[in-house]
Image (cartoon, helix red, strand yellow):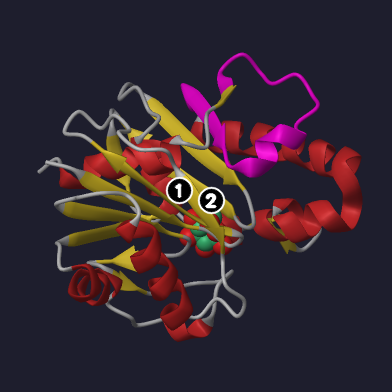
Amino acid sequence: MQTLAVDIGGSGIKVIALNELGEATTERSRVETPNPAKPAPILTEIVSLAAKQGGFDRVSVGFPGVVMDGIITTAVNLDPEWIGLDLAAVLSERLGKPVRVANDADIQGLGTIEGKGVELVLTLGTGFGSALFVEGKLVPNLEMGHHPFRKGETYEEQLGRAALDDVGKKKWNERLEKAIATLEHLFNCDYIYLGGGNTKKITFDLPQNVKIVPNLNGLLGGIALWRD
Ligand code: BGC
């Protein structure tokens, strides 16, 4: 039983195949996210990436927005055309396999957590993703990124890719340090995990319960969608 794991991101689309244990059995492949990031060109990219991954029986997709029962309800960093789309149904028809879809940060978390206590996962990429787990159980679709953080701006406005490009690494690091302290006060987490491509830009010493985790977890976590 092979699972094709797909991660739709604001800057790249990634795929890998996983065995029943959730271990990668192929090399990860990636293409740039088409611009404009509308459903049709992205679905076409996924279908062609899938064709190069060998056989698979089912598909897990991480999507950078709120997903409810396979239907996209927000897509801040893609295109508004996604809203209302039943991505699970549409992709399943294109690939001829069952498809399950979840929020990208939720999947990153599912591929990361230990399942003990309160664990918060933050992803630092194009957007600002968040996922909260209590004793291994997910609180789905936590949208911390669009919650007010400071100076009238949200976490994503202060810490997303556009902000990093705009204010530079030094300021972005100062902001991130403040965000971690704020969220630590709010959730009193046992662990905070940081994922996403921009973790490479972190320059300060993280508190002892905060860990950087591999970006690959955003694909590996896809296996959890099939654990009934
Ligand atoms: C979206 C989240 C997503 C995050 C990371 C945010 O803009 O609202 O749902 O997890 O970006 O992609």
Q: Does residue 174 appear to the left or right of 131 in the view shown? A: right
> Residue 74, located in which quarter of the rendered image?
bottom left
Q: Amino acid at mark 2?
A: Gly
> Residue 178, located in which quarter of the rendered image?
top right
Q: Are marks 2 and 1 in contact (CB under 8 Å)?
A: yes
The secondary structure type at the circle numbered 1 is helix
Q: Single out the residue that lies furthest toward the bottom.
A: 81
The secondary structure type at the circle numbered 2 is strand
Q: Would the CB of label 2 be found within 8 Å of ligand 1?
A: yes
Q: Which residue is mark 2?
A: 129
In reply to whether residue 23 is colored magenta, the answer given is: no
Could you tell me residue 126's position as x and y percent? 64, 57
Q: Which residue is mark 1?
A: 105
Compute the Cα span from label 2 to label 1: 5 Å
Report the span colored magenta: 189-210
Could you tell me residue 10's position as x and y percent? 58, 62
In the rendered structure, find residue 57 and report the number of the disc placed on it. none
Please state, as top left, top right, bottom left or bottom right, where the N terminus lies in the image: top left
Residue placed at 33% from the left, 39% from the top?
Answer: 221
Q: Amino acid at mark 1?
A: Ala
Query: For mark 1, does the 10 Å Cα neighbourhood hold few (<14), some (14 to 19), or many (20 or more) residues?
Result: many
Residue placed at 26% from the left, 49% from the top?
Answer: 54
Q: Does residue 156 appear to the left or right of 78 in the view shown? A: right
Earlier-in-chain disc, 2 versus 1: 1
